[in-house]
Image (tube, rainbow, N blue to C red):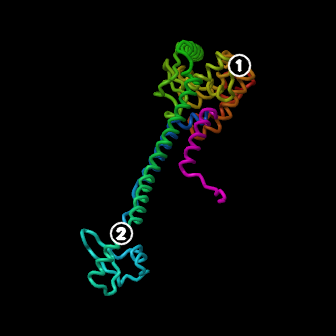
Amino acid sequence: MNEPTNRAPTPLTVLRVVLAAFVLAWLFGPYALRAAVPVWLPFLIALGLELNFVVAALRPGPARRADRGPQTVDRERYGYGGDTDDLLLVRERGEELWIPYSGETDDEVGGLIAGARERPEQEAQAAVVAGGTRRHATVPIRRFVAGLAIIAGLALILWFAESRTGWDALDGDTRAEAVMRFSDEASRLAEKTVRIRCDESGSYVGAVQHRDGVAAVGGDLAYLTPQRCLDLYRLAFKDEVRGSQTGRALAVLTHEAWHLRGVGDEATTECYALQSGVQIGQRLGLSEDTARQLMRQQLAENALQGRGNPEYLVSSDCRDGGRLDLNPALTRFP
């Protein structure tokens, strides 16, 4: 009985496992992954690799020049081994046959030719090989179709999960009520009537634009990503606090509200936003301690994330008693 052998996974198997792991991580992992990597990107890469594998498998190998001399099978059949000096090439009826020749008469040569034509076993074997070649050619296509089915299945799972748990899963009236609440809070901070919109189309904010919110300085309209709107909705309407995600959503809302108020410098705006996030967080349902804890966490993360976006990195004036302290009389910052 043959012992089972350990076979390494094929590149296609590894690709599909990695794609499935990414979808799970994107759905249930940290928001930083969603913000950094558009969900369609790994699917596009996976599709390209699937196409590359199938094309490479179907591409014919380099053509070999036919050897016009007697082939090994001819020499072995007639017992000549590697010696080809005593083989006679006979062309008859469009066929080429190598016949062993050692001084035979014409009649004897004719008998050898007739015997050479009787190759039923060789022809049957050739037919089997040809059939196997055709079957082998269909294997890459079947694997490609299976890969497409896996990609489509994962995309369907992703769409289903997002449609049942994301911002789009909320009915229209609920979304409208939430947006009105966000707009009221932003208007209070901007000291004028402003509007907040959740950019469901992804035209203004999102992974492609590498930002969670956008607003024209001094304007009256700001856009937030649906994920940030969902985090704010969960806080204001469901009393759900999801750690840094909730803190980030508050910081984005207040950041854009300060832009609408007229502050243009990103670092200054961020410093003001982290301080105002405490008050807005409380109005949306947080305790003061929790609101301050979330904003302090955002301030700490600013020092790390600001290295990639230096314009958002708050200055040393963003501290208790500093030039950007909105409430110097209060010793708690932010």
- The amino acid beneath tag 2 is Glu
Number of numbered discs visible in the structure rendering: 2
Q: Tell me the mark number nearer the camera, choosing from 1 and 2.
A: 2
Q: Front-most of 192 and 43?
A: 43
For residue 90, above or below residue 245: below
Q: CA distance from mark 1 to mark 2?
A: 93 Å
Residue 47: x %, y % from top left = 47, 42
- Image spot of residue 260 (x, y percent): 53, 20
10 Å neighbourhood of mark 2: few (<14), some, or many (≥20)?
few
The answer to whether residue 290 is left or right of residue 96 is: right
Q: Residue extending furthest bottom? A: 103
Q: Is residue 187 visible?
A: no
Amino acid tagged 1: Leu
Which residue is pictured at 28% across the width and 76% down the height?
Answer: 90
Q: Residues within 10 Å of mark 1 (few under 14, many from 20)?
A: many
Residue 48 image point, x, y percent: 46, 45
Q: Position of residue 138 (x, y in %)?
A: 44, 49
In the figure, residue 64 lies in which quadrant? bottom left
**Residue that carries the numbered disc 1 in the rendered image:** 286
In the visual, does 312 lie left or right of 300?
Answer: left
Quarter of the image with the N terminus is bottom right
User: Which residue is depicted at the point 42% across and 51% down?
Assistant: 55
Q: Which residues are magenta?
A: 1-30
Q: Which residue is the site of mark 2?
A: 118
Asked whether residue 202 appears in the rendered view, the answer is: yes
Q: Is residue 229 magenta?
A: no
Decide whether the magenta segment is chiefly helix, strand or loop: helix
Nearer the observer, 154 or 75: 75
